[in-house]
Image (cartoon, rainbow, N blue to C red):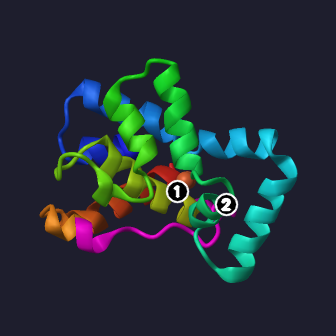
Amino acid sequence: MARNVAQQERQEVKFREQCFLAGMLHDIGQLILAFGLHEEYSEVISRAKSQNVPVWQVEREFFGATHADVGAYLLALWGLPNPIIEAVAMHHQPTQCAVPEFSPAIAVHAADVFAHAFSGTNTEMPPPQIDTAHLTSLGLAERIEIWRASCQEMTET
Ligand SMILES: [Fe+2]
Ligand SMILES: [Fe+2]
């Protein structure tokens, strides 16, 4: 879906492929935390659900880092390109990106919201929300529904 969002914005192949990879890997930090800190992570998930607070905020309280931080750190160790690392690091908070423009981070942020909404997965409870204010500041407000519709179409084919 992140690649699809980039396609909607007529980005070049390299950008689109970075979106694809970042999208595939965006929540890899959750696997690391869930496997490495199994009991604590179960508690994080249940607290996020019971308090209706984004899971990454509870992670920050528990571990001092979020699954986005942990995932991005791993991908940096693996030597992946910076736009992919940034997309994973900022997928919940695209306002933190270095440059305020459409980027793989924005594509992954939006696709993450769509994917969680369409699939109904509960790995991030409450479901992530799109940062409409930030996308509006980037001049992308009217693009959101176009992206959503085209990503929804992907789930139907
Ligand atoms: Fe996430
Ligand atoms: Fe996600």
* Mark 2 Cα-neighbour bin, 10 Å: few <14, some 14–19, many ≥20: few
> CB at mark 2 closer than 8 A to ligand 2?
yes
22 relative to 54, above or below = above
Q: Element at badge 1? A: helix
Magenta residues (range)? 119-134
Q: Where is residue 15 in the image (x, y as percent from the top left)?
A: 27, 31
- Residue found at x 43% / y 22%: 80
56 drawn magenta: no
Identify the residue at horizontal 61%, vertical 39% (top origin): 28
Q: Earlier in the sequence, mark 2 or mark 1?
A: 1
Magenta region includes residue 130: yes
Tell whether circle 1 marks a residue whose Cβ is less than 8 angstroms from ligand 2. yes
Residue picked out by circle 2: 121
**Left or right of 134 in this view: 76:** right
Tell me residue 151's x, y (percent).
41, 54
Q: How many labels does the image show?
A: 2
- What's the residue type where badge 2 is placed? Thr
Q: Which mark is residue 115?
A: 1
The reply to whether dot 2 and dot 1 touch (C-beta < 8 Å) is yes
Q: Please name the amino acid that badge 1 sits on.
A: Ala
Kindly report the secondary structure that dominates the magenta region of the rendered protein: loop
Q: Position of residue 19 (x, y in %)?
A: 37, 37
Q: Callout 2: helix, strand or loop?
A: loop
Distance from label 2 to label 1 (Cα)?
8 Å
Coordinates of residue 32 in the picture (x, y in percent): 70, 38
Residue 1: in sight, yes or no?
no
Most extreme residue toward the right, as rendered? 39
Vertical position of residue 84 compared to residue 69: above or below: above
Q: Work out whether residue 21 or residue 70 is closer to the camera in this orientation and state it.
A: 70
Q: Nearer the viewer, residue 80 or 104?
A: 80
Where on the picture, by quarter, is residue 146? bottom left
